[in-house]
Amino acid sequence: MATPPSPKQAKAGQRAALLLAGTGVFWIVAIWAGGAMNWTPRTRALCDLIALAGFGWALWMTFQLWRSRQTDKG
């Protein structure tokens, strides 16, 4: 049976989830705005790179959280 996460781990999981959700919303809005406002491909690519960085950071946070839970198991 799995033990519940500590409050610190729960907060870290919430932050990772919010970052993932926020990055996804940003990316969808950026794609829509780029098409609606005829942004240059360079500006659209910049938004894609910002979203990629956000997803990468969220992946890193999730990996760190997973590692901390593994070391807590003993």
Image (tube, helix red, strand yellow):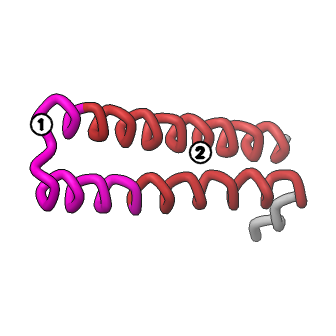
User: Eyeballing the image, is 35 above or below 63?
Assistant: below
Numbered circle sitting on residue 71: none
Q: Over which residues does the magenta segment extend? A: 25-45
Real-space Cα separation, disc 1 to disc 2, in angstroms: 33 Å
* Rendered image quadrant of residue 47: top left
- Check disc 1 and report its element: helix, strand or loop: loop
Q: The C terminus lies in which quarter of the figure?
A: top right
Q: Residue at x 37, y 42 (%)?
A: 51
**Residue at the image position 80 percent from the left and 53 percent from the top:** 9
Image x and y of residue 57, in percent = 53, 36
Tell me residue 15's x, y (percent).
Answer: 68, 54
Image spot of residue 28 (x, y percent): 29, 60
- Characterize the local packing of mark 1: few (<14), some (14-19) or many (20 or more) Cα atoms within 10 angstroms: few
The answer to whether the residue labelled 1 contacts the one labelled 2, judged by CB atoms less than 8 Å apart, is no
Of label 1 and label 2, which has the lower sequence position? 1
Which residue is identified by label 1?
40
Q: Quadrant of the N terminus?
A: bottom right
Task: Report the label total.
Answer: 2
Q: Is residue 74 magenta?
A: no
Disc 2 residue type (three-letter) = Thr
Q: Secondary structure at mark 2?
A: helix
Q: Residue at x 58, y 59 (%)?
A: 17
Classify 10 Å Cα crowding around label 2: few (below 14), some (14-19), many (20 and above): some
The residue nearer to you, when weighing 42 against 55, is 42
Residue annotated with mark 2? 62
Residue 18 lies left or right of residue 30; in this view the side is right
Displayed quadrant of residue 7: bottom right
- Magenta stretch, main secondary structure class: helix
Identified by mark 1, the residue type is Thr
- Of 18 and 42, the residue lying toward us: 42
